[in-house]
Image (tube, rainbow, N blue to C red):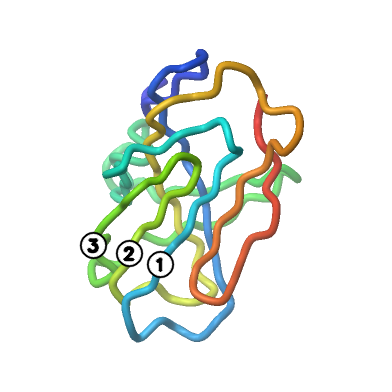
Amino acid sequence: LAIGRDDRPLRRSAIIMAMKFDMEQPTATQELHVRAPISWHFDSVCGFWTEPSEVLPWLTPGQAPAYTDHNGTTWDVEPWPLLAKVLKCRGDEHHAIIEIAPGLRRKDLYLFKIGIKRNPLDTPWRRNTWSLTFGSESSGAIPGFL
């Protein structure tokens, strides 16, 4: 796919995720934790993209991105703020930690793309869930894909 996703076993890939949080706006550097199912692996220095042309390359210049959830509801997506620079992305097997400078706003929906070093050989059957944690907020279990 245009985003770099490849679902074949043991291949390098990428996924797009959406996040929105309710806490107070961060005033200091925060860590975003992305936890994949155990058999997925992130690079030790992982790729993390926030520019709309990198996350959704099919958008035309000036086109506002939108996100449609699993219920069919469409949400407006905000551009990643310039102040909220991604300082570092490091992976350790199925866990990636992304350091983000202050600048993200609460209640805004953001999209990002994160690189995957290696897909699993088989679909996990025990715990096929992802999760996002940012500051004191967590997404809970996000169902994985087959």
On the rendered image, what quadrant is the N terminus found in? top left
- Measured from the top left, where is residue 56 in percent x and y? 38, 38
Q: Which residue is mark 2?
A: 99
Classify residue 61 as left or right of residue 35.
left
Q: Which label is found at residue 87?
A: 3
Q: Nearer the viewer, residue 81 or 61?
A: 81
Q: Which residue is mark 1?
A: 31
Q: Earlier in the sequence, mark 1 or mark 3?
A: 1
Gap in angstroms between the C-alphas marked 1 and 3? 10 Å
Residue found at x 41% / y 45%: 92
Above-or-below relation of 34 to 93:
below
Question: Counting other residues with Cα less than 10 Å from the Cα at mark 2, is it few (<14), some (14-19), or many (20 or more)?
Answer: some
Amino acid bearing label 1: Glu
> Helix, strand, or loop for circle 3?
strand
Q: Nearer the viewer, residue 125 or 67?
A: 125
Determine contact: label 2, label 1, CB under 8 Å.
yes
Gap in angstroms between the C-alphas marked 2 and 1? 5 Å
- Measured from the top left, where is residue 103 in percent x and y? 32, 75
Question: Counting other residues with Cα less than 10 Å from the Cα at mark 3, is it few (<14), some (14-19), or many (20 or more)?
Answer: few
Residue found at x 32% / y 50%: 90
On the rendered image, what quadrant is the C terminus found in? top right
Determine contact: label 2, label 3, CB under 8 Å.
yes
Classify residue 109 as left or right of residue 90.
right
Q: Earlier in the sequence, mark 2 or mark 3?
A: 3
Amino acid bearing label 3: Leu
Gap in angstroms between the C-alphas marked 2 and 3? 5 Å
> Helix, strand, or loop for circle 2?
strand
